[in-house]
């Protein structure tokens, strides 16, 4: 299957992308991973992207699209892929359609992870990270430490990242609504959007997603 995964910050896209790709037997293609891989390998695209990033500018769509094209042409993506973080806007979605049409293939589904805005704020603004080890993550509501402000694992101080403050989260949501959410209507016009709730246990959301994708695939055959 060829799937695009969309949803607001805090919807759990990263977690679900990894799980769904494994269950479906397709590569998980994340924009963040693409940038890191190209920059670390010092590819021409990586160097170009880094020049924009170092200057504090957004990487142009054409560079992101070229990276995604290169990755989708790798042998492991021959029978499908799951795109996470791309396309990020309608112009990227249109470019993706052109790429796929050029290869004589098309998307099977666009999986939209739906979550109420206040839940997004609660999920992200409630995160607390250990200063000693950023892999030690807690949440004031969902997974609180035994002692407030102290890491259960190593005793380090827990803090809230600037990116996780409520004001920043709301700004990120504004960007999502303005730039990325319009691709849902774009793909709805093609009959590709499958919307599921991203509330509940992680396993339950994965099961919900797989069942929705299975129904979508059966309906299109």
Image (tube, rainbow, N blue to C red):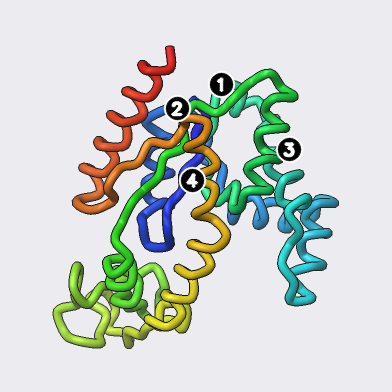
Examine the rendered structure and indicate whether residue 115 appears above or below residue 119.
above
Q: Counting residues from the N terminus, which is met first, the one under dot 2 or under dot 4?
A: 2
213 and 143: which is toward the camera: 213
Query: Are there few (<14), some (14-19), or many (20+) residues within 10 Å of tag 3?
Result: few
- Where's residue 90, x and y in %? 62, 48
Q: Where residue 94 appears, x then y in whole percent? A: 67, 40
Task: Measure how far apart labels 2 and 4 are at the Cα level.
Answer: 25 Å
How crowded pointer 2 is (Cα within 10 Å; few <14, some 14-19, many 20+) is rated as some
Instruction: Single out the mark in the foreground, 4 or 1.
Output: 4
Q: Residue at x 73, y 54 (%)?
A: 61
Whether pointer 3 and pointer 1 mark residues with C-beta atoms closer than 8 Å, the reply is no
Q: Is residue 125 left or right of residue 96?
A: left
| Neighbour tally class for label 4: few under 14, some 14-19, many 20 plus, Cα within 10 Å | many
Residue 118 x/y as whole percent? 28, 70
For residue 70, which numbered disc appears in the image?
Answer: 3
Identify the residue position indicated by label 1 in the image.
79
> Which residue, given by chain and number where applicable, does mark 2 sit on?
25
- Label 4 vs label 3, nearer the camera: 4
Q: Earlier in the sequence, mark 3 or mark 1?
A: 3
Residue drawn at x 57%, y 60% is 179
Q: Is residue 2 left or right of residue 219?
A: right
């Amino acid at each position: 299957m060829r799937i695009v995964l969309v949803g607001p910050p805090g919807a759990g896209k990263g977690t679900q992308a990894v799980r769904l790709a494994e269950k479906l037997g397709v590569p998980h293609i994340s924009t963040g991973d693409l940038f890191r891989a190209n920059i670390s390998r010092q590819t021409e695209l990586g160097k170009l992207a880094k020049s924009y990033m170092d200057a504090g500018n957004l990487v142009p769509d054409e560079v992101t699209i070229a990276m995604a094209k290169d990755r989708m042409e790798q042998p492991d993506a021959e029978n499908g892929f799951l795109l996470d973080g791309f396309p990020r806007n309608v112009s990227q979605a249109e470019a993706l359609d052109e790429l796929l049409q050029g290869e004589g293939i098309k998307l099977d589904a666009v999986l939209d992870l739906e979550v109420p805005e206040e839940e997004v704020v609660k999920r992200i603004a409630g995160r607390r990270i250990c200063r000693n080890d950023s892999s030690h993550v807690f949440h004031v509501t969902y997974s609180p430490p035994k002692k407030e402000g102290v890491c259960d694992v190593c005793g380090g101080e827990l803090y809230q990242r600037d990116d996780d403050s409520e004001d920043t989260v709301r700004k990120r949501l504004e960007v999502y609504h303005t730039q990325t959410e319009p691709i849902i209507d774009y793909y709805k016009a093609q009959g590709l959007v499958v919307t599921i709730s991203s509330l509940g246990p992680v396993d339950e959301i994965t099961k919900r997603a797989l069942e929705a994708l299975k129904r979508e695939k059966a309906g299109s055959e």
